[in-house]
Image (cartoon, rainbow, N blue to C red):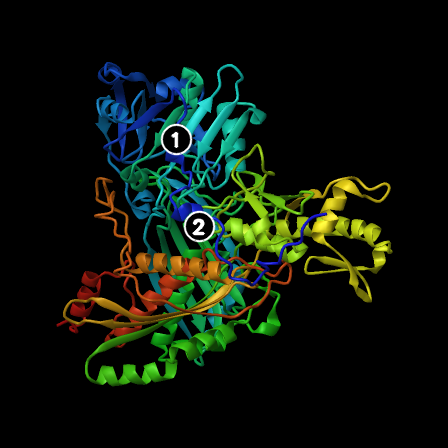
Amino acid sequence: MAVETPLKGNIGDSIKRKEDDRFIRGKGNYLDDINLPGMLHMAIHRSPFAHARIKSINTDAAQAVPGVVAVVTGALLAQHKLAWMPTLSGDTQAVLATDKVRFQGQEVACVIATDPYVARDAAALVEVDYEVLQPVVTPQKALEPGAPLIRDEKEGQKDNHIYHWEAGDKAKTEEAFAKADRVVKLDTFYPRCHPSPLETCGIVADVNPATGHATLYMTSQAPHAHRTLFAIVAGLPEQNIRIISPDIGGGFGNKVPIYPGYVVATAASLLIGKPVKWVEDRSENLISTGFARDYYMSGELALRNDGRMLGLRVKMLSDNGAFYADAQPSKFRAGLFHIVTGSYDLAAAHVETDGAYTNKAPGGVAYRCSFRVTEASYLIERLVESAALEMNMDPAEIRLKNFIQPEQFPYMSATGFEYDSGDYPRAMQVALDKLGYKELRKEQAEKRKKGELMGIGIASFTEVVGAGPGKHYDIVGLRMFDSAELRVHPTGKAILKLGVKSQGQGHETTFAQIVTEELGIPAADIEVQEGDTDNTPYGLGTYASRSTPVGGAATAMVSRKLRDKAKKIAAHLLEASEADIEFDHGKFFVRGSPSKSKTIQDVAFAAYTNLPDGLEAGLEGVTYYDPPNMTYPFGTYLVVVDIDRGTGQVKVRRMVAVDDCGVRINPMIVEGQIHGGLTEGFGIAFMELITFDEEGNCLGSNFTDYLLPTSWETPKFEMGETVTPSPHHPIGAKGVGESATVGSPAAFVNAVIDAVGHLGIKNIDMPVTSDKVWEALNKVGAAE
């Protein structure tokens, strides 16, 4: 008989992360730790120009370098029909450029060598004769009549326009604006930024020429989906492809797309018959892999004189770079921007968006955000702040006046999203009380009398995560469900296999806790496995904060499936009717006789040794969970800043974050997720910027030029919580991985505008650097 172990790690317990021990000891296994016998190395020759026609490529000098095995060009790939590949958005992208280059840093040729440094040196010797063309670096210029055509290889493509997409009711919105006492408008730009994971992207491709099996070790957030894409692109039988994602040092959306380096390394391994490793360096990661944001947004809010919001009108233009490669459901051309009505009871809204090609690297990754939710949240919260400023209302008051009320849930938004649950006034009140809002407003008034600049920023965000449902949401056509497979051994220990894939989120602990809650097996007795397509059920991966809403739900459901079977076995062991068996905290007992019980460990042992007649042996199962709706985490963030009139320097004095992500599985991990997201939001608001000069040169290709926050700059965060379970999720969890990055940039910027708004300054676009603030102050005669 199995030995009973004490229960630990139920939902709500802040147990330590199981995976941290190996990470802290340096025992993690990352992509660059993988070295195979006979392995070759790959380096990429990239374009120095943003827009240029390729007249010829000479690889003689590179091929002559001792140690070089092969030089791969687009022409060679074209012979194997691999020169172009599909993007996640259904566009096409050059694997290696054949006709012309379309952004600085685009992949032109690859060198395969016995040593990584030889490969890099030889890649620099590839000679390309370019005819430089006029680049286009903004979407506005790209859409001007007569602008240079970037995608001239696409049949029927006559200009640089990609898509037009609308949501909401235009006529109803126009009626709302016609009835308004006033209209508040804001034009703002959410700049291009980069996820910058600690570990860059890479692959070790090992195609066995004897068996035809391809084992691909990849930094992949979605290994199963990537396997299917590889099968489609490379023409390999899918059952012959195994993708293994080892430990991943951060993803943040950057490791969802398929990059050319993955494809070329696999093709090279297939053609040469040896394993090929490619690991990009930091500059390659910053220049050529998926960017985020880059949205120009114009919002108008229709209001009554008492501050009641009547309608919202939005126009938006996105810069998609040279290839439309956004990571998002293919049915939604602007992702989940529908959430732009935010936390407010808006009767009417209408959104129009357009996308354009430019001579920049393809962007559109969901950088710690669920497909354009960050941009939407930023716009509505900056717009509401503008309304408060223009109407001389308290920013908290105007929000409280317009919030969707708790009794209105489930709530259908004007853009067609059904919010699941929420209590926005309560979250805001918790935040206001924690900050001491009223006292700080008095302090601000006193400081203004002395000419000092102090601001209090507010952002009350609503996020949308957990894509599916599969009938509406997909990635490259694959329905967005997810999966969990649970196997309980005779000793009562278990293995949980998932279709999602951690990049540092703590899955090994969090998902074990769900099983603990549902079956009573201690979390320490549950091994969680992910990231191996041969040994885990098919899933769509981890991004858009969908692991807990979808993969977590699958885990709860498969646990319940096993619990139902375990109940039959317990009834057999207890010689009672199944209808009389109850379950509580890992024990099955006869109703009314709690002393007559069997533990889950007893039942697990019996599942292999002592079964009732007719019942199949074993205690294992698999569930594919297709969510009925997405989940809607929310919260209120408050920021206090002081601004120096002489330098424009913004000092964040306090930051209070109150999050509601439904049921918290492991509060300590949740707080860690929020802390990291707030740090990233702080960086986006004040520091991070990928920009380009008029020639399309990328400015910000290293961490000297692309500034990330360190512990030195990052303010201290004060956190609070409310808990509003999602009514349709099996355990009421909503997901939290992206909330802080979604909600915090607007709070930081609103604090700055709150400090200077009375001087006539209505907007400063991110990043809000000291020179921008000083220039704005100087323009209104307020700088020192």
Q: Is residue 342 above or below residue 454?
A: above
Q: Is residue 608 left or right of residue 454?
A: right
**Placement of 411 over or under 522, stated as above or below:** below
Residue at 58% over, 73% down: 406
Q: Quadrant of residue 102?
A: top left
Direction from residue 284 to residue 611 in the image, left or right = right
Residue 629 visible to an observer of this rendering: no
For label 2, the residue is 20
> Looking at this view, is 779 or 34 the one in front?
34
| Amino acid at dot 2 | Asp
SS label for mark 1: helix
Q: CA distance from mark 1 to mark 2?
A: 33 Å
Viewer-side residue, 294 vs 596? 596
Residue 737, position as x, y percentages in the image: 47, 55
Q: Report how many numbered discs are placed on residues in the image.
A: 2
| Image x and y of residue 701, in percent | 25, 42
Q: Amino acid at mark 1?
A: Pro
Q: Position of residue 194 (x, y in %)?
A: 34, 47
Q: Is residue 14 visible to the viewer in this orientation of the structure?
A: yes
Q: Is residue 520 above or below residue 753?
A: above
Q: Which mark is residue 260?
A: 1
Figure quadrant of the C terminus: bottom left
